[in-house]
Image (cartoon, coloured by chain):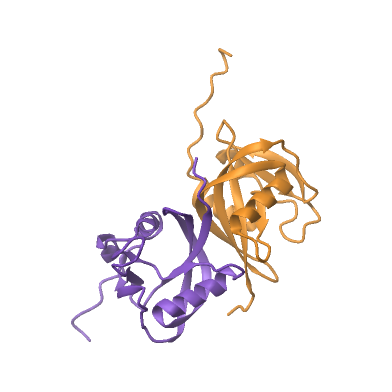
Chain colours: A purple, B orange
Amino acid sequence: MTSKPFALSVRIVLFDQHGHILVLKRSKSSRTNPGKWELPGGKIDKDEAFDAALKREVLEETGFQVVIHTAAGTAMQETEEWRVVHLVMIGSMMSGGLAISSEHEEYRWASPIELGGLEKADWFEEYFRMYLQAIPAAPKESTGSE
Amino acid sequence: MTSKPFALSVRIVLFDQHGHILVLKRSKSSRTNPGKWELPGGKIDKDEAFDAALKREVLEETGFQVVIHTAAGTAMQETEEWRVVHLVMIGSMMSGGLAISSEHEEYRWASPIELGGLEKADWFEEYFRMYLQAIPAAPKESTGSE
């Protein structure tokens, strides 16, 4: 039986107008999941409310001020030191402009199908399979009339 | 748009040897969901780690000391004052004996099918439909040979 402590991380699913989801590619120098794609968010600081933590992390990592709507599942991650619970919330962008931090090296608005093909962080792969894979593809947009 | 604050609650799924789940019936004098069935657990106190909060609440409500294994989804609840996120964990009983508190008036080890028929707290009804309904019934035990 493991005696590693638990940590709680909060993550956000942000959709654009096409139903694509904002994902960030972790820096190659990250200690865990280097170069892998993930959802914005991160660990809750001591004495910090989970929604305040999520807003802080998302602003730091994406430049967006967000509102949080609802909870949308969980995923687990085992690191050398921690058993991390990722609590995933659905949110919307309110203001700000996309600007990623040094923690990540790339961003993408990915459709559920594109997400399937990305190399994802271990916990996000689990989350994707449980919760996102089943999202139907958006209807093809007309390319002729606009 | 609501401006109610978020609150985070942690809940536990405890299975017995038959695959039945421990559920508690809220007191008829409860402010929310009176007389309805729910999973053990409750709100995280300020400055409390989520796993410590869950162990504390489960001990208070069931008399069991538990270990926590893994995260198993979320459900939302809207009360007059709060938007409550219920983070559900799977755990096991380590020690102690079942003794419920005044917050509840009854307990039951319920199979997923029995759970379907109970009057559940609003958030637990949502959780049940999303996560528990699909659990296959345990194979019928032999009644002749024992």
Q: Position of residue A67 (x, y in %)?
A: 51, 78
- Considering depth in this image, is B136 or A107 the residue closer to the camera? A107
Residue A45 placement: quadrant: bottom right
Q: Is residue A56 above or below residue B70?
A: below
Figure check: A29 above or below B15: below
Q: How many marks?
A: 0
- Name the residue: 41% across, 71% down: A40
- Measured as percent of width and height from the top left, residue B21 is found at 60, 40
Q: Residue at x 34, y 70 (%)?
A: A23
Does any portion of residue A107 appear in the rendered image?
Answer: no
Q: In this picture, is A101 found above or below A96?
A: above
Which quadrant of the view contains residue A139? bottom left
Q: Which corner quadrant holds the C terminus of chain A? A: bottom left
Residue B25: horizontal and vertical position, in percent? 72, 47
Is B80 left, or right, of B2 in this rendering?
right
| Residue B24 visible, this orientation | yes
Query: Residue at image x 64%, y 75%?
Result: B4
Judge left or right: residue A145 versus residue A121: left
* Residue situated furthest left in the rendering: A144
